[in-house]
Amino acid sequence: MMESLNNNSHKHTVHHVLAHSYLLYFTLFLLGIFLDFIYNYKISEDIIMAPTGFAFLVFATIVILWAQKTGRDFSKTKELKTLEHFYRGPYCYTRIPTQWGLFLLMFGFGLVVNSFFISIFTIIAFLISRFIFIDKHDRILVEKYGEAYTQYKKIVKL
């Protein structure tokens, strides 16, 4: 019974950490839009910006949807005690596919609308998330899953 309570608290904690990361992205995105309306600095006048940004939007959407589907498959598994349980879908390439997808989605939008502030704040949000929230996320998962997640972190660096 106590183990079940601990698993639920870990699960809640991981989602809590990720929710803070997503809130940071959203807040800096809104700040970028606000500053763009005031100052209207452009990244470039090159016509390739919008198609590149659109490609990022499409790719990011695919990555996020793929990560969410794979994540639902994780929840169907009773125990995640071996490396193979983590090493599926986009998680073969990155431990944080939703974070990468969110970064590419927002950065792509910044390129489509040619917004300096949205693009810069997206990079700042990613760096803060990576070095604060994702590190906490990884520590929680190492504590919860032990050696299996530690091995996974050694193989999948991003």
Image (cartoon, rainbow, N blue to C red):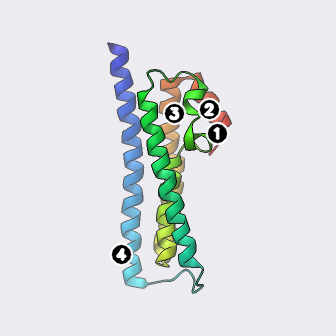
Circle 1: element type: loop
**Quadrant where the image shows the N terminus:** top left
Taking the spot 40% from the left edge, 66% from the top edge, the residue there is 29
22 displayed left or right of 87: left
Q: Work out how far the residue at label 3 is from the one at label 2, CA to CA, in angstroms.
A: 13 Å
Q: Name the residue under label 1.
A: 156
Q: Name the residue under label 2.
A: 152
Of residues 82 and 51, the one nearer the viewer is: 51
Q: What residue type is labelled 2?
A: Tyr
Q: Work out how far the residue at label 1 is from the one at label 2, CA to CA, in angstroms.
A: 6 Å
Circle 4: element type: helix
Q: Work out how far the residue at label 4 is from the one at label 3, CA to CA, in angstroms.
A: 35 Å
Of residues 114 and 39, the one nearer the viewer is: 114
Q: Where is residue 26 in the image (x, y as percent from the top left)?
A: 37, 60
Taking the spot 62% from the left edge, 44% from the top edge, the residue there is 93
Q: Where is residue 74 in the image (x, y as percent from the top left)?
A: 46, 32
Q: Mark 3 points at which residue?
A: 139
Q: Which numbered mark, 2 or 4, is in the foreground of this view? A: 2
Taking the spot 36% from the left edge, 40% from the top edge, the residue there is 16
Q: Name the residue under label 4.
A: 34
Q: Work out how far the residue at label 1 is from the one at label 3, CA to CA, in angstroms.
A: 15 Å
